[in-house]
Image (cartoon, rainbow, N blue to C red):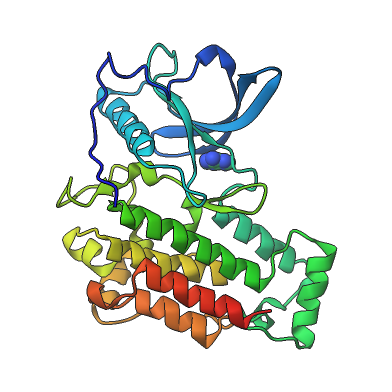
Amino acid sequence: SIDYTITPVKESESLDAWELLEEKLLIKDVLGEGAFGVVRKGEYDLGEGKRTEVAIKMLKGNPDTEEKRQILQEINIMKSVPAHPHLVSLIGCITQGSLFGPLLVVEYCSKGDLHSYLRNILDKLHNPFYANQLDSIIIGEDIKCASNRLYDLAVLENNDIPQPKDLISYARQIAIGMEYLTSLKLIHRDLAARNVLISSDNTVKISDFGLSRDVYYDKVYCKTTRGKLPIRWMALESLTHQVYTSQSDVWSFGILLWEIVTLGSTPYPGLSTGELLVLLKDGYRMKKPSNCSDELYLIMSKCWKATPKERPTFTELRKALDDTLETIS
Ligand code: ADE
C-alpha cells in the first residue's frame, strides 16, 4: 500500500509539474455549484493545435483563507493519489497568480453525474409510451419476459437507456474505485450517486475524493467541510458518534446501490432526516425496491449492518457484483 501524508503547499514548492498555465486555460459554462465552490467546463491548450476538455473547480465569491486552505488541501490529496480508471483524474492546478484563486483542473466527464443520469432514464421511462414498466424491470436478474421486451424496445429506440446489466456494471466500477481508495487508506465520506461521474466511453468515476480524510490523519472528524451533512447516506456510527471509516463508506455504497436500482430516488422516501436516526437505531432499514432482485437486495442490506465489521469490504462487494453480472447475459 502507498503511504501518503498531506503536505502543506509552500510558496516555493507550488510551481511543480502539476501547475498549469492560466493563459492556456479557457473557462466556460458552469457545470455545477456547491456550498462554496463552483465547477465550470473548460478547455486546456495542449499545443500543436490540440485542446482537451476539462472541468475546473474553483471557489466563488470572496473566498476566505479557510476556503483557500481547503481547496489547496483537495489539490494536494488529488496529487498524492496515483491515477485510477475509476477515479476522476487530476489534470493539474493553478495555485498562484490566478484572479479566481486556486483552480483544480480535472478530466471532463461528458455524461455528467450518475444521479442526474439515473433521473434522466426515469424520465424517459415515464414517457407515456414506456409507462408503468419500471416495476417490471428486475435489476440484478436476467429475465426475458414480455415486460423486459418493452424495456428492450425502449433501449432500441433510445440507445442511451442502459440495460439492467449496465447499471450493475456501474456499481461494480464504483466498488473497484472504492477498493483502490481504501487501499490508500482514504475515506470518501460522501459516496453518493451525485459524486459519481460518467465519461463519454461510459466509464464510471468517483469524484470529490480530494475531500477525503486520511484514516490516520484525522482520527476523529466532527464537522463536515461540505456544508450540509449527507444524512441519508451516512452510517449509523457516523450519525451517532461522528465516526468515519472505510466501513462507513461501505454503508454509503449500499445506499448508492439503492439509488441505482430506483433510478435516482431519494433514500428513505417519505421519512424526514429527523425521524431517520431513531428508526435506524431501532434496526429499521429500507425495504427491497419492487424492481430489485433478491440477490442485489441482499448485497445492499449487508452494507447496512449496525456493526461495521459485519459489513462486506469493497473487495467482497466487487466480487459479489462480479458474480451478479455473470448471471446476467
Ligand atoms: N461536474 C462536476 N465535475 C464534473 C466533471 N469532471 N465532468 C463533468 N461534469 C462535472
Q: Residue at x 56, y 72 (%)?
A: 261
Image quadrant in which the C terminus is located: bottom right
Q: Residue at x 29, y 75 (%)?
A: 280
Q: Nearer the viewer, residue 187 or 275?
A: 187
Q: Position of residue 133 (x, y in %)?
A: 72, 78
Q: Nearer the viewer, residue 76 or 288?
A: 76
| Rendered-image quarter of ligand 1 | top right
Q: Is residue 196 left or right of residue 48?
A: left
Examine the image and state in which quarter residue 61 appears.
top left
Q: Residue at x 31, y 75 (%)?
A: 311
Q: Is residue 320 above or below residue 173?
A: below
Q: Is residue 231 visible?
A: yes
Check the image and name the residue furthest to the front: 1
Q: Is residue 274 above or below residue 151?
A: above
Q: Is residue 216 left or right of residue 191?
A: left
Examine the image and state in which quarter residue 69 appears.
top left
Q: Position of residue 228 (x, y in %)?
A: 34, 48
Q: Is residue 155 above or below residue 38?
A: below
Q: Position of residue 138 (x, y in %)?
A: 63, 81
Q: Is residue 264 visible?
A: no
Q: Position of residue 265 (x, y in %)?
A: 53, 66
Q: Residue at x 52, y 74 (%)?
A: 322
Count of numbered badges drawn on the protein: 0
